[in-house]
Image (cartoon, rainbow, N blue to C red):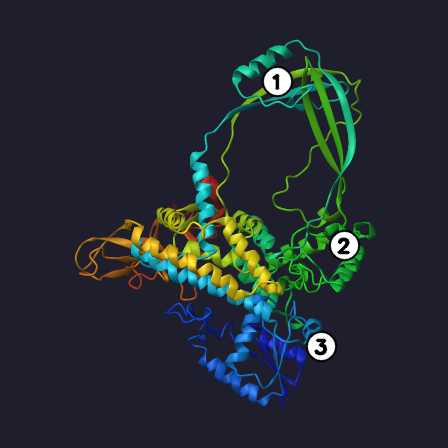
């Protein structure tokens, strides 16, 4: 019989960890949180030192009952929830819910789910860290106060179903502020002037950009200014005034943190923050690798640290030296220290075994898991490699007191770039003719002028919003994805072609929050609260002090808002469907499971219908509309609106074009249009088809 019980959060970890620990250990899962504040009331006793009232989460009774049975059999209990504040709090709640006060209870953490890490954690078992627990309690209470006090104000003044949140409301404000900035932007004209030269002894012409005068850099603001410069240059003699050759070093990137992983996965793989975190969780919890069983292939995914363990550092050095050569191995660790404050208990996100290359794991991973693992693996390997070195050449060409410049570079040593280049890095393929000197004779081939207008700041994407939140100190690694998911689900913002746009509802909520609760949506105030929570974690601030100082101002603002705020009516979006009961034109509503159609005659008429998004293509079987639908498990497909009467369905999106060969409906597959009849096999390019 097993003597020791290990309790983890996720059932996905149970089998893996049991295999690592052997017969003396039983492993069970709590399935995340087991206790929380009650859903029906605030759950915080504001009159008695802000004491939270925790209850068992609905549906967790059976799980706790099974865990209690296992606890009775065990000599020792190890609480092995995730290695962060939330994980520490879950362990503390388990301690209370399972009545473990008189048991031998130990807290263990591991940054990766590998045999070595799990076994090593047992040697460093400790007590629960109450500073971490209190930091999480403070966060939970603050979030509950904001949500439960402000959301009813939004229900009363706008409409039911809305919500406010301590972090989500600030994220919404950041997006709204950018939208206002874009709307208020007035473009300014400017011009560029490029010169093309014939270089003595060279076939290829040399292109140079206008810099300004020989004394200062200058922007050409108008066509008049441009004409003045052109007049000065008429008939002028062009001469090379300086040639500078040098070297530029490009440092290797830091390994991924939660924020940088979400940003890069969005840019490179087009993943939402939510999808990135879901896939990373799967890679962390364990993948069934042929010949090895289930094993975690990346380290813990919620971290703001760029630190790497000594063992991983040493393994990376050996791997890089053997695979790429000694000159590619990185120098000292000191060169890569991040200036940011980091939670040093954590590591950066990295592969648990650098020798487990993406190619080796490809058969064991889904396509998206493979793409994310490959990104993490390449970034980590690159971070342990030598910098890239460029040869640079800078040339200044003067004429009539005006200056043109040419800057070019060529890779001398690719270093880390042999493995990894960031998505937003431009390819540096500029090459300059060798042998150009101050004596080189130039003859002007022509001047090319172009008019430009300054552009506003771009709309936020999920990636750039995460970056902004991190830079402003809003939220923490675990909050970025759920925050964005929430404001999308509430329809405060919508996502189109990666960009995030504010809806009318989002504008109304944001304006109301700014008017009634300015401190809640103040970026600096929210960042200060995060710093206070860090203080609680470090043991320098009492958590109830943070809550006690926050609540009175919030309570006063809520009372004032209830009296003074005007009600705002937002019209529902009309659909093209009519009510079967009373004939009114139905409107689109938003529920917990997405959009649905409702009769505007509620409560007299309570008729509702499912909402299906039409794609503008007729069903090939019955001629009715094809609509976007979802299976019970959430997978998208396209089917006839008349289902079940008509059984047409396909997984890929149909288009209006018909097959040139057999006349069947065509399906969109990436950049191609493919015939839906598998026996036909007709394929054509989608872009050409649109043209």
**Where does label 3 land, which residue?**
123
Distance of mark 2 from mark 3, alpha carbons? Answer: 27 Å
Residue lying at 81% horizontally and 52% vertically, measured from the top left: 325
126 versus 185 height, above or below: below
Q: Residues within 10 Å of mark 2 (few under 14, many from 20)?
A: few
Which secondary structure lies at badge 1?
A: strand
Earlier sequence position, callout 2 versus callout 3: 3
Q: In the rendered view, does 296 fall on the left or right side of 139?
A: right
- x, y (%) of residue 130? 59, 71
Quadrant of the rendering where the N terminus is positioned: bottom right
- x, y (%) of residue 330? 78, 52
**Where does label 1 land, which residue?**
447
Disc 3 or disc 1, which is closer to the eye? 3
Distance of mark 3 from mark 1, alpha carbons? Answer: 73 Å
Residue lying at 45% horizontally and 74% vertically, measured from the top left: 54
**Where does label 2 land, which residue?**
333
Tell me if residue 17 can be seen: yes
């Amino acid at each position: 019989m097993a003597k020791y019980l290990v309790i983890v959060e996720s059932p996905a970890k149970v089998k893996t960890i049991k295999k690592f620990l052997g017969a003396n250990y039983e492993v069970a899962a709590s399935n995340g949180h087991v206790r929380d504040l009650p859903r029906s009331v605030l759950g915080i006793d504001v009159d008695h030192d802000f004491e939270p009232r925790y209850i068992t989460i609905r549906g967790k009774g059976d799980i706790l009952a099974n865990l209690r049975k296992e606890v009775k059999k065990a000599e020792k209990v190890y609480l092995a929830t995730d290695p962060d504040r939330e994980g520490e709090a879950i362990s503390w709640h388990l301690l209370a819910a399972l009545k473990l006060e008189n048991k031998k209870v130990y807290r263990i953490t591991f940054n990766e789910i590998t045999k070595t890490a799990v076994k090593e954690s047992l040697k460093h078992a400790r007590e629960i860290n109450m500073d971490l627990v209190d930091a999480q309690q403070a966060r939970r209470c603050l979030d509950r106060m904001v949500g439960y006090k402000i959301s009813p104000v939004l229900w009363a003044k706008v409409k039911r179903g809305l919500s406010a949140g301590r972090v989500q409301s600030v994220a919404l404000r950041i997006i709204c502020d950018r939208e206002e900035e874009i709307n208020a932007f007035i473009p300014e004209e400017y011009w560029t002037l490029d010169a093309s030269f014939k270089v003595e002894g060279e076939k290829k012409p040399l292109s140079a950009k206008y810099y300004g005068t020989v004394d200062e850099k200058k922007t050409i603001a108008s066509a008049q200014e441009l004409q003045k410069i052109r007049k000065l240059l008429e008939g002028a003699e062009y001469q090379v005034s300086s040639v500078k050759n040098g070297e530029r070093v490009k440092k290797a990137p830091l390994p991924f943190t939660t924020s940088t992983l979400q940003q890069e996965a969005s840019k490179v793989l087009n993943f939402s923050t939510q999808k990135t975190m879901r896939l990373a969780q799967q890679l962390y919890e364990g993948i069934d690798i042929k010949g090895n069983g289930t094993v975690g292939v990346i380290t813990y995914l919620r971290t703001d640290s760029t630190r790497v363990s000594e063992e991983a550092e040493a393994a990376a050095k050996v791997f890089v030296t053997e695979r790429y050569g000694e000159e590619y191995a990185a120098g000292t660790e000191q060169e890569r220290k991040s200036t940011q404050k980091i939670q040093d208990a954590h590591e950066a996100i990295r592969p648990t075994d650098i020798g487990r290359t993406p190619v080796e794991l490809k058969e064991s991973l889904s396509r998206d898991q493979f793409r994310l693992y490959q990104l993490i693996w390449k970034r980590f390997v690159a971070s342990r490699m030598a910098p890239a070195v460029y040869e640079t050449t800078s040339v200044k060409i003067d004429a009539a007191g005006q200056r043109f410049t040419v800057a070019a570079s060529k890779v001398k040593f690719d270093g880390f770039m042999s493995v990894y280049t960031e998505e937003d890095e431009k390819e540096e393929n500029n090459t300059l003719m060798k042998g150009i000197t101050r004596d080189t004779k130039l003859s002007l081939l022509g001047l090319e002028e172009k008019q430009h207008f300054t552009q506003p700041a771009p709309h936020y994407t999920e990636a750039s919003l995460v970056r902004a939140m991190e830079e402003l100190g809003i939220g923490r690694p675990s909050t970025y994805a759920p925050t964005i998911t929430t404001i999308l689900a509430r329809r405060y913002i919508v996502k189109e072609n990666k960009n995030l746009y504010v809806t009318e509802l989002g504008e109304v909520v944001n304006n109301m929050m700014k008017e009634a609760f300015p401190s809640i949506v103040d970026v600096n105030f929210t960042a200060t609260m995060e710093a206070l929570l860090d203080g609680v974690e470090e043991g320098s601030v009492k958590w109830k002090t943070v809550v006690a100082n926050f609540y009175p101002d919030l309570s006063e603002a809520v009372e004032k808002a209830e009296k003074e705020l005007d009600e705002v009516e937002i019209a529902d979006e009309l659909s093209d469907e009519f009510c079967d009961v009373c004939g009114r034109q139905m409107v689109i509503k938003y529920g917990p499971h997405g959009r649905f159609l409702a009769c505007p005659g509620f409560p007299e008429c309570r008729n509702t219908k499912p909402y299906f998004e039409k794609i503008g293509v007729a069903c090939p079987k019955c001629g009715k509309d094809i609509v976007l639908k979802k299976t019970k498990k959430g997978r998208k497909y396209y089917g006839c609106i008349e289902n079940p009467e008509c059984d047409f369905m396909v997984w890929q999106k149909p288009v209006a074009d018909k097959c040139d060969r057999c006349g069947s409906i065509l399906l969109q597959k990436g950049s191609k249009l493919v015939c839906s009849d598998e026996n036909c096999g007709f394929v054509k390019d989608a872009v050409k088809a649109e043209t």
